[in-house]
Amino acid sequence: MTSPASVRTDHDAARRLRDPNGPAACSGPTARDTRHYEAAALRADLTVVHVAVTAPALPVFEEATAAFARGTVLQTTLGPVAVEDLRPGDYVETTTGPEPVVWIGGTSFVPGVRSEGSALTGLTRVVEDALAPGRPDSDLILGPGARMMVENARLKTLIGLSRVLVPVSDYRDGERFVPVTPAGTVRLYHLATRRHALIRVGGMLMETYHPGTGIRRQLGEAHAETFLTLFPHLRGLDGFGELSLPRTSREVLENLGSR
């Protein structure tokens, strides 16, 4: 039987996941080192569970929940939907067909809050037509967890693929990819599908969430258990499955071009 206290916690987590004006930043003496994260997950029995976790303000946690700003529109099988209105069980359009959303995480960028080692110190504005006409089709505000698909023909001979995933923040240039520090709180989200996939965000191909192949090393024993509490639909880190494409950095790609 579920206790009243846990029911309140579950409902509060659901509200905070949706509400950008709800309590998001940590307060008190630990504010410099921790951050509030919320998530909703679809379990195998098709029930949805909500969790709220206070965890370290470190990239491994922040990138899981901070890719797309509130208002970012994603394509679902029922049409365009703002990321904050998505629910576990909704189907999003991917490059390989519709996939169910099994997890949605959220946190907030709060101006003036700084934590040593944090990746969430600013956001990136991708201006309309930054990559090509209609890519994106309007300005996007993205967090440190956002990765986009990049094509490079030289990769074909090295890894057998010409497409890789690269952090959007790697392309900051002050013109097309502009670092921004909003004056107010910005709610951010990320989502995971049943299989790691590419989704269209404003005409750009971007990945759904996956922690990457080095997640065990990043977490260590100290943070692994806390990290998994954000993903109540999984029994362990192996539950994320395989990456759909390899990841790299802009620097690596540019070094290939100079050879």
Image (spheres, rainbow, N blue to C red):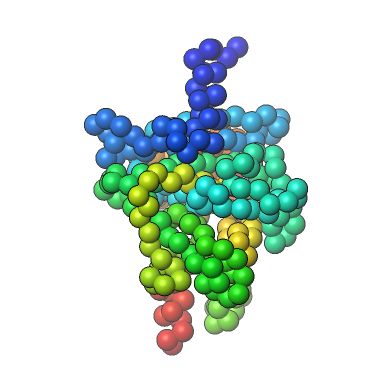
Question: The C terminus is located in which quarter?
Answer: bottom left
Give whichever of 210, 239 is nearer the camera. Answer: 210
Question: The N terminus is located in which quarter?
Answer: top right
The image shows residue 166, relative to residue 48, as above or below, that is: below
Please report the residue visible at 55 percent of the width from the left and 78 percent of the height from the top.
152
The x and y percentages for residue 208 are 58, 53
The x and y percentages for residue 234 are 58, 37
- Horizontally, is 259 left or right of 140 in the view? left
Please report the residue visible at 64 percent of the width from the left and 35 percent of the height from the top.
42
- Residue 180 at least partly seen: yes
The x and y percentages for residue 230 are 50, 36
Total numbered labels: 0
Residue, far left: 29
Give whichever of 127, 153 is nearer the camera. Answer: 127
Please report the residue visible at 65 percent of the width from the left and 44 percent of the height from the top.
101
Please report the residue visible at 29 percent of the width from the left and 36 percent of the height from the top.
31
The image shows residue 232, relative to residue 127, as above or below, that is: above
